[in-house]
Image: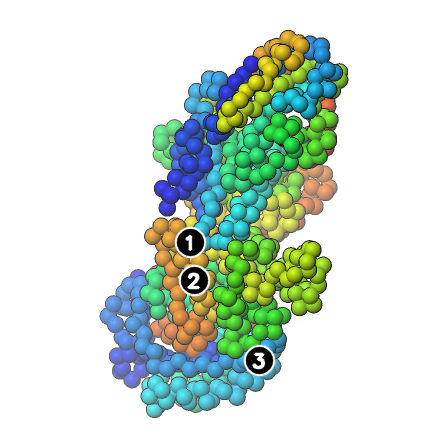
Amino acid sequence: MSEQLVAQISEYLTPNVPIQLVSQGAEAVVFTTNVHPYLPKESYSGVEDAKFIIKYRPSKSYRHPSIDKSLTKRRTLGEARLLGKLHQIEGLHVPHLIACDAYNGCLWLEFLGENLPNGMGFSNLKNFLWMYAKGGNDPYDPIVLETLYKVGQEIGLLHWNDYCHGDLTSSNIILVREKPGSDTWVPHLIDFGLGSISNMVEDKGVDLYVLERAILSTHSSYAEKYNECLMNGFSSVYENNGKLGQKKLKEVINRFQEVRLRGRKRSMIG
Amino acid sequence: MVNLNAVPPKNGRDYYIAIGLEGSANKLGVGIIKHPLLNKHDDGDYSHDCQVEILSNIRDTYVTPPGEGFLPRDTARHHRNWCVRLIKKALEEAKIIHPTLDIDVICFTKGPGMGAPLHSVVIAARTCSLLWNVPLVGVNHCVGHIEMGREITKAKNPVVLYVSGGNTQVIAYSEKRYRIFGETLDIAIGNCLDRFARTLKIPNEPSPGYNIEQLAKQCSNKENLVELPYTVKGMDLSMSGILAYIDSLAKDLFKENKKNKILFDKESGEQKVTVEDLCYSLQENLFAMLVEITERAMAHVNSDQVLIVGGVGCNVRLQEMMAQMCIDRSNSKVHATDSRFCIDNGVMIAQAGLLQYRMNDVVKDLSETVVTQKFRTDEVFVDWRE
Amino acid sequence: MTVFKFPQFQRYEISVSLFHNVSNTSDVKLKIAELPYALVDATMVCSIEQLYSAIYRAIVESTYNRLRTKTLHSECLLCLAPSSNIGEAFKRFGIKDESKEIIVIKIKDTEDDQDNDPEFPDIIKGDQVSFDDETLQATKNEELIRKVRIQTL
């Protein structure tokens, strides 16, 4: 299947845009390329190793072509618009949107992150925490705790502005160095394919729950402290917004606890 | 490793016999099955391969006139009228002469479902239990579907799409529970189809969903789909909005409301859309949504097998679409059973119940046989699997 | 003048030039309809990315959907604007009588054989300067750009 998909998108992109497969989800396939869709080569090829992300929603043959076309367009456009709006939020870090072709299900995005040292993999939160859990490193290193606090702040900002991520796992949080060589990491949220505008406490509670579970399942020994830092960062954003912030924070945390108890799913009716 | 032979069959037999009673909706089913005592079940994970022998599978459906749905009180009355007949017939077909000696366990649907019908059936179960002095086991209806599906298709660990009149869930097994990955946020798909059938006033015989499927097949205008809302929300889906919309389209069609530009041509007033077109569009839309959430679950748990269970699983178009998705996912496979097992039946309750019985999960006191309308699939402790 | 093609769309050759101290803006404005170019008020553009992304979008719409304006050139102007109001877009991003800084864009369809179009300097009387971020930053009208962009958020 992958070959077919790659052939499909290669035809659309033309041989002038060489691509490399990064990951394949149920809905979209992610590639990297070193060719920019519309800037002249001189403008970016000076930067060593310039890379861009192409997120492609392939057409699905099982559904009727008219459903397929309209759905692909709607989802691609929706994600693009969401990223555009999120970019405006001060303090929130999301990939920069470069180009959008909703008719072909194609999004061009800024490439974020780097390879962690010692073959620890790509700089998402999951691998980052793994790196500090391995031999010689201190899992409770202040850098780790500080980074987790910042992750919490990102989510807090997202929710405070009434947006939800929809798939907040530790692979969807990319860490970018503040400056090359620095040990300070700035967390960025990626993959808003399931994201939405939502002021519902339920959606926010679920976002927090999904991340908590992701950290619990991959770093269970240190999860308690990690999730504490996360929630502290999260709460700080709400607390900075006076009485209303306090009130809303309480609502979100209460719902979060409820979601925890029932495991995310509501009661069924027979 | 799981030991399914912990509880030996009664009377020194080398096989188990279970009778299952199902009546959570309008289908009353009585099924009798036989599990041979196999060595491999001593230690392993073979609950999908019990080599079941179906001794009888009797069912009677309470069918209402076109345009009407079935109400709990009438359905319960139907079950009360038929259960003795069906149980006797099942015993006869299975050639069971002495239930006390020959039957290991009586399995009944504990829930979820409609209250009064469930209640009628459990009373029959309790009565048989007291009459024959045979233990009881309460079974979750959804788990019944899943276990029957696994046994018939031999799919060991598939992602399960459970779609019926009362349920729409995407389930995957993990650590002793059937976890619900995605589900409907409001009504079940079968319910949606049934209610649309009512709006169209098509017959409920053999089932409203079947008749919608036949109408959809007769659609002559497949290229021009009627656009309907597509409401997948993450891993879940919602259908009440689609139903409301398509109901209103159907009503406009019957009233010949020329103002509706989707149904009638702007200038000539000619009818552009038929009932068949509506059925076709509804199916294509709903099924695409189901396949999508199933695919998401498969990607999440890294599975390459899908099992479709529940009444709506009989729909050939749904099976086709799922198969296509699986082909595209390379090496994935779709499993489905036929109408004997897709549609509610007693055998599936016996199958799941017998597995529970073999793990010593029996009713110790009659008070445990209370039925419940709400019974989530993930509340069941699946100790018969690894 | 920058001339190149987008990697995906080899069919179109894109030429862009930036002029300062334009003296014949009113004359040019009168002839706009016949000129096979897009003329953009450079003070409304703060980066080359902004301009090129609009051209890219115009070509995508033209290739895979449909144009909302009459030509690919006028479409570029619409794509620069945050709203889909064509009149607004032309008014804001098109040249005004007082405009002294003008960007000229020509999108040539290589499938068209003929090319008798006049050269940019023949039409625009002014100093051709390098089209880059630095030059644009020097003349941008930040206040107006912000005002226009915020309108649609």
Q: CA distance from mark 1 to mark 3?
A: 36 Å
Between discs 1 and 3, the one toward the N terminus:
3
Q: Would you name the residue on which mark 1 appears? A: B325
Between discs 3 and 2, the one toward the N terminus:
3
Give the vertical position of B71 relative to B383 (above or below): below
Q: Residues within 10 Å of mark 1 (few under 14, many from 20)?
A: many
Chain where mark 1 sits? B
Residue at 43 percent of width and 62 percent of height: B319
Q: Is B17 in front, or is A143?
A: B17
Residue at 53 percent of width and 47 percent of height: A69
Q: Would you name the residue on which mark 2 appears? A: B319
Q: Are marks 2 and 1 in contact (CB under 8 Å)?
A: no
x, y percentage for residue B142?
A: 47, 68
Q: Is B70 in front, or is C15?
A: C15
Q: Are marks 1 and 3 in contact (CB under 8 Å)?
A: no
Residue at 64 percent of width and 46 percent of height: A198
Does residue B238 appear in the picture of this structure? Answer: yes
Chain where mark 2 sits? B
Side (left or right) of C146 relative to B362: right
**Amino acid identity at mark 2:** Gln
**Amino acid identity at mark 3:** Thr
Q: CA distance from mark 3 to mark 2?
A: 27 Å
Give the vertical position of B275 relative to B14 (above or below): above
- On the same chain, marks 2 and 1? The answer is yes
x, y percentage for residue B273?
A: 60, 61
Q: Are marks 3 and 2 in contact (CB under 8 Å)?
A: no
Q: Would you name the residue on which mark 3 appears? A: B64
Q: Secondary structure at mark 3?
A: loop
Side (left or right) of A165 relative to B4: right
